[in-house]
Image (cartoon, rainbow, N blue to C red):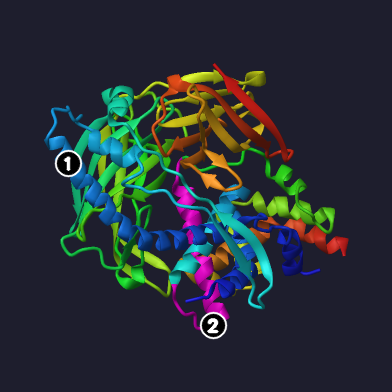
Amino acid sequence: MNERISIRRALAPLHASEGTLEEVLKMIEREDTRKMTYRRTGRRTVHTALLAAALALALAGTAWAVGEYTGFFQTVFGNESIGSRDPENKTLTDKDGNVVKQYVVPGQERAPVDPDQAQELVGDVTANVGTSVTIEGVTFTVEDFVMDCNGMGVLTYTMEDPEGFPGVEFDASSMLSDPLAGGRLTGPVLTVHDGSGKKLGWLDSAQYVAAGGTDTKKTVVLYFAAFDSLDGTEQLKLTFSVATDYDADEGELDTKEGGILFPMAGAVDAETLTGPEGWSASVSPVGLKIASPEGKRGGYEYYFNAVALQMADGTEYVLEQEEPYMYNVTVGAICHDGGTAMVFDRLVDPAQVQSVTAVARDTSTDTDFTLTFTK
Amino acid sequence: MFTREQFTALAQQHMDMIFRVAFAYLKSREDADDVVQNTLLALYRAKKPFQSETHLKAWLVRVAVNESKKILRSPWRRRSDAPIEDFADTLAFEDPHDGELFSAIMGLEEKYRTVIVLYYYEGWSIAETAKLLGIPAATAGTRLARARQKLKRYLTEAECYE
C-alpha cells in the first residue's frame, strides 16, 4: 500500500457532522425571509412613524416625565422598532425536484414594553456611551447599553454614511451587505477587555436593524451574551470594520477597522430558581441562564427546547416552542462554564416569574428530560 | 449565482473536504463544523461564477483556511479537551491501523497536518498546496518531507499490513 492510500484511508472517516448543511440552509432561509420581511415592513415603517408622531404629540400635551432612556427601552425591548414575524414552512428540493427536507423557519413574537417599568427594573444600570469612530467615511456611534450579572445584555449603535449605504439591504432585523454590489459593512465584533484594555475574548451577539432611520443613518440593536462570567471591572469594545477592497476570485475582503472601548456601568441582578438534582436557572430582566449540575466537567453539553417562563399573572413567556415554531430569544449561547445563556427579545420582571420549564437534551446520550425550576 | 438546488448539490459534494481541511487546522469537530457552515455561507453569498471545478475547490479551500485561521486566532475558541485518540475511537476505520495513523497525523504540528491533508488526501500538487496555504512552494515541500519523516514508522507499518 503506498503512502497516499494509507493516508487517505486514515482520514476517510472524517465527515462534516450530520445537520451541518441543514443548518446552513436554515440560515440562508432566514436571510431570505428577512429580505421578504423588509419589503413588508416598508409599509409598517410608515405606520410606526405615524404612531411615533402621534405619541410625540400626546406627550407634548401632558406633564408626563419621560425617562432618559425611554427611546432606548422602546427600541430594544419593545415591538415597534423591531417587529414580529410569522414562522414559515419551507420545502427543500434537489435539482430533480425531489423533496430533500421540509422544515420551518421560526417566527418571533415581540412584545410591547412599558418604559416606566423598564426604568424601574434596569434604569439604574443603563448607561450612555456616546462615543464615535469614523472609518472610511462611515461614522459609528455606540449609544446606550444595559447588561446583567450573567454577562447578557443589549446595546444600540448608529451608523452614518453621508453617501448612503450602497450594496446594503436593510430590513427590520438584519442587514445584508453585498461586497460585489459595493456593500462596505462587514459587521462589528463585540469583545471583552480587562481594565488595562487587554483583550480577554469575544461575546456572542445578534444584530437587529431598527425600523426607520434615514437613507444615511441607521440604528442597530445588538444583543449579546458573554461566554465567561464577568466581574464588572472589565470593559467592552465594539470593533467596526469597513471593506476597502474585495477580491472575488480569492474570496478575500480587505477591511479597515476601528473600535470603541467603554467601561461597564454595572449589572442588573438576577433571581435564582432551583431545579432538580443541582440544576438552577438565573433570570434577569434581559436574559435566562440555565446551569447544569455537572458544569463543564466531563464536557457535558445540553440543548434546550420548549423553554418557558410562567408569570404570576398566569401568562407565559415562551422562549422557544414548536407548532407553531417560535424562537423568542435573540442570542442563545453555550457558555464556557457549561451553562446556556438565552437573551430575551423583551423585558422581563424577575419578581413576576413563578417558574421556568425546559426540555433538556443530553447531547452525550441524545436523551430528553423535562426540568422545572421554582423559587 | 447558484440556484438553491445547485448550491445544495455543491455543498453536499464539497462539505467533507472543507471539514477535513478545517479539522487539520483545529482538531475539533465543533470548530470544524463551524468552518464548514461559514465557508458554505460564503459560497452562497459569493454570487460569482467559477471557471471550473478546480477553481471552485481552490476557492473553498482558501475560504476554509481563512476561516480556520480566524478561529485559531480567537483566544476563547472552543477547544476539545478530550485526547485525539478518544475522538478517533468514534470514527469508523476500515482497519485498526488506520486509526493509529489518524492519531499520528493529528499528533503532528498544524503546519504539517494541513499539507498532509491537502497533498495526500485532496490530491493537490506541492505548488498548488503552497498557493492554497499562502506559503512558498519550497516551504510546502519541506513541510511535506518532514511530515512524511515523522509518520515514517506508521507508514512502514502500513506497508507491513499489506
Q: Kindly identify the residue that appears in the image at 28 percent across and 42 percent down.
A: A156
Q: Position of residue A222 (x, y in %)?
A: 35, 44
| Region rendered in magenta | B47-75
Snapshot quadrant of residue A80: top left
Identify the element where label 2 is drawn.
Answer: loop
Q: Give the residue at the far top of this rendering.
A: A375
Subunit under mark 2: B
Q: Kindly identify the residue that appears in the image at 57 percent across and 79 percent down.
A: B53
Snapshot quadrant of residue A67: top left
Q: Position of residue B147 (x, y in %)?
A: 63, 59
Residue at which label 2 appears: B52
Residue at which label 1 appears: A56
Snapshot quadrant of residue A105: bottom right
Examine the rendering and report whether any part of residue B126 can be seen. no
- Residue situated in front as seen by the camera: A297 or A354: A354
Bin the neighbour count of mark 2 within 10 Å (Cα to Cα): few under 14, some 14-19, many 20 and up.
few
Q: Exactly how many numbered labels are in the figure?
A: 2
